[in-house]
Each structure stands twice: as C-alpha cells, then as structure tokens.
Image (cartoon, rainbow, N blue to C red):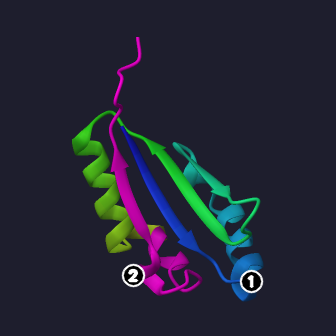
Amino acid sequence: MILFCEYVIPELHREAFRRWASEHKELWRTGELLENTAQPGVFVELWRTTGEDEAAQKQKERLEGRSEWRNMECWVKGGREGLRVWTFRPLIPNG
C-alpha cells in the first residue's frame, strides 16, 4: 500500500520549508518528498506501507500533526486543513 500526502507551500514560505525539510531528513527516511516540476510549491510525500494498519497509523500521524510534523503546518497553504492524505492499495499484486 502507499500513503500519498499532498500540499502546497506558497512561494513566500518555500525556502523556509525546504530548509526545515533538509534539516529534518530523518522524517522522510522511509518515504519520499517530491516537488512538482510544472507547479513549484506543490509537494507530495510517498510512503510505502506494509498494510492497512501501518497506512492508517501514518495517516493519523500526518493529519493530527503529531511530533515534528506539526512544525511544518505553518507553511502549508490552509494549515493542517491544506494537507490531503490518501491511501492506495495495489490493483494488481507484485510477484
């Protein structure tokens, strides 16, 4: 399964966000942080999970702003409400 997080960081805050993200690389050690090349400021996080329980736990952590994640909300357009999170399951299993 994949947990997909999407949000927008306005240009005014983008450099501060990038700096913070770089200083907290450990937050993404099991995921990926990506920025849209056609729409700068649109960021996504991709998290591979072992199943629904892990995906639900990660989703709860992201949406409730627990731990270090809470610190990034000040840069997200719309604050915590601007963070969109979806869980995707594979349609065709690997293997």
On the image, which quarter does residue 2 sit in? Answer: top left
As for residue 81 lying within the magenta part, the answer is yes
The quadrant in which the N terminus is found is top left
Task: Please state which of residues 91 and 54 is positioned toward the viewer in this rendering.
Answer: 91
Task: Name which residue lies at 47% across and 85% down.
Answer: 79
Dot 1 and dot 2 residues touching (CB under 8 Å): no
Mark 1 and mark 2 lie on one chain; the one further toward the N terminus is 1
Task: Please state which of residues 55 and 38 is positioned toward the viewer in this rendering.
Answer: 38
Q: Residue 11 shows which numbered tag?
A: 1
Task: Please state which of residues 87 and 56 is positioned toward the viewer in this rendering.
Answer: 87
The kind of secondary structure element at disc 2 is helix
Task: Name which residue lies at 66% across and 65% down.
Answer: 21
Q: Residue 63 shows which numbered tag?
A: none
Of the residues shown, which amino acid type is indicated by label 2?
Glu
Q: Is residue 66 left or right of residue 16?
A: left
**Residues in magenta, as a range:** 69-95
Q: Which residue is mark 2?
A: 81
As for residue 2 lying within the magenta part, the answer is no
Q: Residues within 10 Å of mark 2 (few under 14, many from 20)?
A: few
